Image: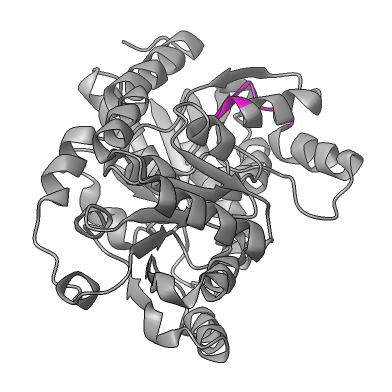
Amino acid sequence: MIAIANYDFRASGTVAKSIEIAIALQNAGVPVELWVVRAQGPLRDRVPQGLPVIETGSGLRLRWRAVDLIANIVGLAVAIRRRRPSLFLCGGNHLLLPSRISSWLSGRRRQMLCGARASNSSQRAGRSRQAIHREIRLKFGSRDFVVAVSQELADELQAARLKCRIAVIPNGVDLDRIDRLAAAPCDHPYFQQPGGPVLAAMGRITHQKGFDTIIDALALLPVETGARLIIIGAGTHREVRTLYKQAARLGVADRVSFAGYRDNPFAFLARCDLFVSGSRWEGASNALIEALACGLPLAVTDCPTGNREVVLRGPYGTLAEIDDAASLAAAITTELDKRRPRSGQSAGARHWAIEHCLAQWVATLRQERPLA
């Protein structure tokens, strides 16, 4: 049996991909379970009946995810010992250290393969190369194999001289599902009222995603542009309030809309004019490929890792410097002036069709431990 583990079912690309991989394995006849510390979150409804969900956390939940993970390391070890998976796969970077400790505490580390889906770069502003490599070896050390979501991320892992096998499987998108959901009605006022172009930004509202840089860039655009921004994604009240205050201070609060988490963001994306990302780091952005599938041109930061691989493949957009609002504003202006054909953008997303990516996952996991 293969266990694919995450902290919970929050609205994140990491969780969505773990669910998709598990479904693909089950459809291929491979026994698989989804393991979570907390079996809650908006993506729980995406798990089909018949796909086992194993909750490893205790009844006492601590406020912060990192602290709750540490407090439940023993519970994860107990689950490993009792359920005896032949292959344990970390769904994303957040679970790497707790699962490494749990696998040894369980007493079954030598009886099962341990793999990881590398979902994020370890590069941050101000970190030395040596510090980055130490972090990578700490997180991914002792794994039997690692699957990176972009070639650039795989190169980062290889530079740290990991001793395990490293493969690359890009994130895939369900093009048929996106086309179907994009056609749904969307009554957001920006699409009902005349005005300037509508920019879309999407993702969890965190420092990583750089929404503050996007708002700064919006304020730098010429007033006559009349550009408006919709931010799609969940965040704490404090995080959203901080961004709103920033927009108000810059005089663009009336042109920024916080749409929150949406089960169907594609109805929004399909009606926007441009997708903008201010990410400071990524692994490979699901939102970027989903926006491309909706026909949007891209104005995004050249962050580590993955954005460059998507944008320059077409090319499908313009890259900007990280934490540089003027550079991002220039990229937005370039793309609004260029007006790339939407049909060409959406056609480019076929390279990341989900069926190809999931077939690679099934083949890779079968090769690591043939089960069916």
Quadrant in which the C terminus is drawn: top left
The residue positioned 27% from the left and 74% from the top of the image is 195
Observer-nearest residue: 49 or 179? 179
Where does the image place residue 355, in percent across and percent down from the top left? 27, 23
Where does the image place residue 298, in percent across and percent down from the top left? 44, 46
The residue positioned 52% from the left and 39% from the top of the image is 284
Observer-nearest residue: 66 or 3? 66
Where does the image place residue 312, in percent across and percent down from the top left? 53, 30
Could one spot residue 236 in this view of the protein? yes
Observer-nearest residue: 197 or 12? 197
Where does the image place residue 365, in percent across and percent down from the top left? 44, 18
Q: Quadrant of residue 363?
A: top left
Could one spot residue 32 in this view of the protein? no
The residue positioned 64% from the left and 55% from the top of the image is 280
- Answer with left or right where residue 160 lies relative to residue 310: right
Q: Which residues are magenta?
A: 141-151
- Answer with left or right where residue 351 lies relative to residue 311: left
Quadrant in which the N terminus is drawn: top left
